Image: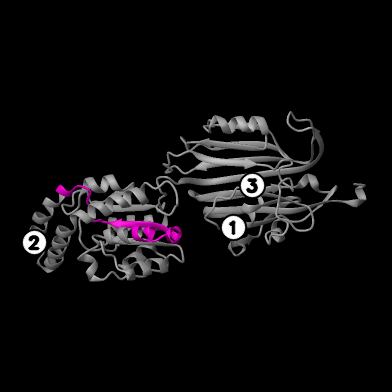
Amino acid sequence: MITSLKADLNEEVDISYIKIPSSQLKNIDEVEDAVISQLLLACRNNFTILAFGSVSIVIMNSILKILGSGKSDHLRNIDQIIFVSPIIFRDKLAFKKIHVYSALWSILNFKSWRLAFRENNYLSTQKGTISRIAEQFYRRIIAAESFSASQAMIPTAVLFNPKDSLLDRRSIESVFFNKTRVKEKYLTFPSFGSETLSLLSSIVKNPKAHKNVFWIKSLAVNIKIFPVQFEKIDLLREKLIADHKGEVRLKFDFHPENSSILKFNYRFSVGINGNIEEITSFRDFKNETDSSNIGRFERDGNEFIVEFVPRSTSPHKLALDVLNGFDDSQEWDRNSELEKIVRPAKKRQYFYYPFGNGEAKYDNVLITINLEKYLGSHAITEPQLYIIDTPMSLEFTDSDEITSLILSDYSYIPGKLLYRGVYSWELKTKERGVFVVTWEVETNDQNGN
């Protein structure tokens, strides 16, 4: 198996076994701690689970027991689960055909009669358990809408032959979302050069997205900030004094295979001294957020929420003009360790974007910060970008959320100078966490300010 898969992938892959004791084939409802321990150990790094035949239901049960043990966060590093010819049943009547098929197959293939006999006995005694596990796996993994103590949004794919008499096609069709039909019928791992192995290699290299995870092919973030001297009289404020203005331009290109039917959410907020001045463009989609969110934005002007269901692969574009949206307009905990990164002694501007808590997968993210208008009148430092890998979808609305960050989880990503005052970064494959871009701005004394 390892040799065939490595040869077909044409690249080095790390493959390790999870040893499943023979006792698991006698009573899969009693998954031993050894199996779960090996899964949890593998969860320290990103990896793919591949299971064949009856082992699939053991893996399903192990995942469910990890959820039940309160260790759902450990499952976030599973890139995907792939089942080949999974033996699962949601309809108990489907077991009638197993006996006939196994007996016939034993006669025609004498060398493997022991496998057929064992498989037959195993399934016959576990039909109720298999039905229950398959139902739970569908509800808590396949159909999960979030990562929580009881759910895990793990992409799951299956390869199967719909004409294979040992499989219950109706159960496979109803349980799995990402399913691929193959022509080959087998009870051993597919050989090198087979159609199944080729499809398997393709899925390993290009994982499918979860049905409730947005698959974004590319996100382009363009931020242009320039100094201003501006006073605005507001209905609720006596006076808003702004020293900078920002233009936020976002373009979302959803993957052609994105199939999430949930509402995609983006939120931009500023502090009490900031104001989202206007929405300059809102193209190709309708904001489907609650009327209360729209009303709050029209009243206060410091928080804008857009929600929509992606219904096409054409770019979804959003543009906002913001006053005082990138500085110290929020309340910050000056005593926190994070201040050493986000708020040093000099006045600093920043922009952040939460990738989400597992509900979105980004293949490519391109970030551009334009500070060209500050050159001459101000001294600016080179912007720094930090990736904070956290399962939380932080909105950075108050000091409690900021100080809750674990500093050991952040990493610095060097930028690229496009031309004077303009910097860019490119990120590959992000699914969670938040990026923060920070830079210092100081008025030049020689300009008389």
User: Residue at horizontal 23%, vertical 55%?
Assistant: 130
Disc with the residue nearer the chain's start (1 vs 3): 1
Q: Residues within 10 Å of mark 1 (few under 14, many from 20)?
A: many
Q: Earlier in the sequence, mark 1 or mark 2?
A: 2
Q: Position of residue 118 (x, y in %)?
A: 15, 65
The question of residue 118 being in magenta is answered with: no
Residue at mark 1 to residue at mark 2: CA–CA distance: 58 Å
Which numbered disc, 1 or 3, marks the residue closer to the eye? Answer: 3
Q: Amino acid at mark 2?
A: Leu
Q: Residues within 10 Å of mark 2 (few under 14, many from 20)?
A: few
Image side of residue 107 versus residue 123, left or right? left
Q: For mark 1, give the secondary structure.
A: strand
Q: Quadrant of residue 80?
A: bottom left
Find the distance from the CA under tag 2 to the CA under tag 3: 68 Å
Label located before the other in sequence (2 or 3) = 2
Q: Is 77 contained in the magenta span? A: yes
Which residue was labeled with disc 2?
108
Which residues make up the magenta segment?
64-93
**Residue linked to disc 1:** 388
Provide the residue designation for mark 3: 397
Percent coordinates x, y for residue 189 in the rendering: 25, 63
- Res. 114 visible in picture: yes
Tag of residue 135 = none
For mark 3, does the 10 Å Cα neighbourhood hold few (<14), some (14 to 19), or many (20 or more) residues?
A: some
State the CA–CA distance, disc 1 to disc 3: 16 Å
Residue appearing at x 34%, y 60% in the figure: 65
Q: Residue at x 75, y 50 (%)?
A: 421
Residue 63 placement (x, y as % from top left) = 35, 59
Q: Nearer the viewer, mark 1 or mark 2?
A: 1
**Amino acid type, residue under disc 3 in the picture:** Thr
